[in-house]
Structures are given as structure tokens and as C-alpha cells.
Amino acid sequence: MHLKQGPQNAIRSVLLSVLKRDLILAFRRRQDLINPIVFFLMVVTLFPLGVSPEKSFLQQSGAGIVWVAALLATLLSLDSLFRADFEDGSLEQLALSPHPLFLIVLVKVFAHWIVTGVPLLLFTPVLGIMLHLNGEQIYTLMLTLLLGTPVLSLIGSIGAALTVGLRVGGVLITLLILPLYIPVLIFGTGTVEAVSSGVAVTGHLSILAAMLAFAVVMSPVAASAALRISLSS
């Protein structure tokens, strides 16, 4: 006996299929998976060599170095967020399907964060020790990255959607999205500096959490509208 699949079950099945497919494709395209991580590690590792290896300087600027490297690594990976689906035609099929496109975009951004944001989080304790950050600073830095890196992926999805049909999309994404990353960068580094100064960080973390909540609600809607514009042009 076959039970009729309800609309909610159908949407859930589609979203899980999109998530599973994106993760499988990401792990098959290993260069797209590894390049942002290697870039992140190289920037953080080379910064003390190029600027100053002094312990006091690294303790003061370590959080900013990690945050800037994470921001640039995320930018580096954004061009591939929708491009493969656009080139093989599956993005157009997703847009024409009866399922809400903004939910599909949200799932694709979540998959992007799993393969880019989570590895950056995992390497942060090692880099924090290398930059002479103490345990409390490293813990706070990881907490800010946990809240901030999904915001970077969500905001970046808007730029990736707008430029998905362009050959020089990577450069345009940087120009479009980089100014929108500045508040996240300010509060991400400011939280760790507050810990170093002995100031309570609850307010800083609350603002980062509010940015994440706002980005989760608004970014998929904006990105889905941008995708429809790109596909129609």
C-alpha cells in the first residue's frame, strides 16, 4: 500500500536531496574544497613572517588576522556556489520547480558553509596557539567565527547569484560583497579585543547572533530573486 506524499514531505525530500548532492559534488571537486582552506592557512601563517613575529603584536592583532583570512577564503569559494548548477542546467530546473527557491538556496548555502566555514573553525585553535592567543581568546574567536562565517556565506550568496552568468563573476562578487562584510568583521574582531580588555562580550555576541538571524531570513530571499534575474537575462 503506497501512502500519498504530502507537500511538506515532498519539500523536505527535495531539500535533503539538494544538500546531499551538493556535499557529494563538493567532496568530488577536491580542488574547490581544499583551495580556500589552504589559502586561509597560508594567509595566517605568512602574516607574522611578513609583518612582525613579536608575541605582543600577534596577541593584539591575531583575531583580526584570522578574521580577515576567513573572510578572504570565503570570498574565494563563493564563485562556485551556483556556477556548476548553472552550467549543467540544473539551476534552471530548480528555479522552475514548484518548490520554494529560497529554501533551496538556503540549503545550498548551508552545504557551502559545511565545506568552507567548518574547516576554518577546526583549524582556528591551532592558528590561535601559533598567534600566541590565550585559551579564552581562542574560545571567543571560535564562537565569533561560528556565528560570523554563516553570515559571510549567506551574504555572499547574493553576490554569487547576481554574477552566476558572468565570466568574471569572481571579481564582481568581491566588489559587491566586500563592503557588506565590514560590520561582521568589526564585531568579530571587536569581541575578541573585548575579552582581552576584560570587558563583557555578551552584547557583541548578541549583535553577531542578530546579524545571523537577519541574514538567514533575508539573504535566501534576495539570492533567489537575484538567481531569477540572472537566469532570465
Image (cartoon, rainbow, N blue to C red):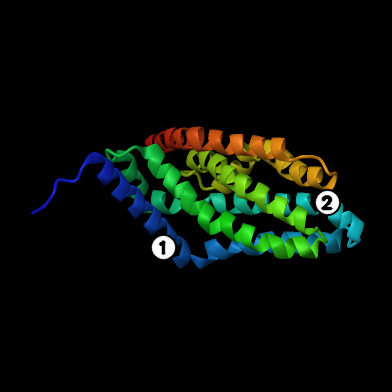
Say the numbered circle drawn on residue 24: 1
101 sits left or right of 115 in the view: left
| Residue 158 visible at all | yes
125 sits left or right of 131 in the view: left
Residue 183's x, y, as percent? 69, 36
**Looking at the image, which residue is at 77% across and 53% down?**
137
Residue kind at label 1, given as amino acid type? Ile
Which residue is tagged 2? Answer: 61
Q: Tell me the distance, in whole angstroms, between the alpha carbons under discs 1 and 2.
A: 37 Å
How many marks do you count on the picture? 2
176 sits left or right of 139 in the view: left
What is the crowding at mark 1: few (fewer than 14 residues within 10 Å), some, or many (at least 20)? few
Between 72 and 187, the one lying in front of the other is 187
**Looking at the image, which residue is at 31% across and 47% down?**
12
Above-or-below relation of 48 to 97: below
Mark 1 and mark 2 in contact? Answer it, CB < 8 Å: no
Residue 149's x, y, as percent? 61, 48
What is the crowding at mark 2: few (fewer than 14 residues within 10 Å), some, or many (at least 20)? some
Above-or-below relation of 34 to 210: below
| Residue 182 visible at all | no
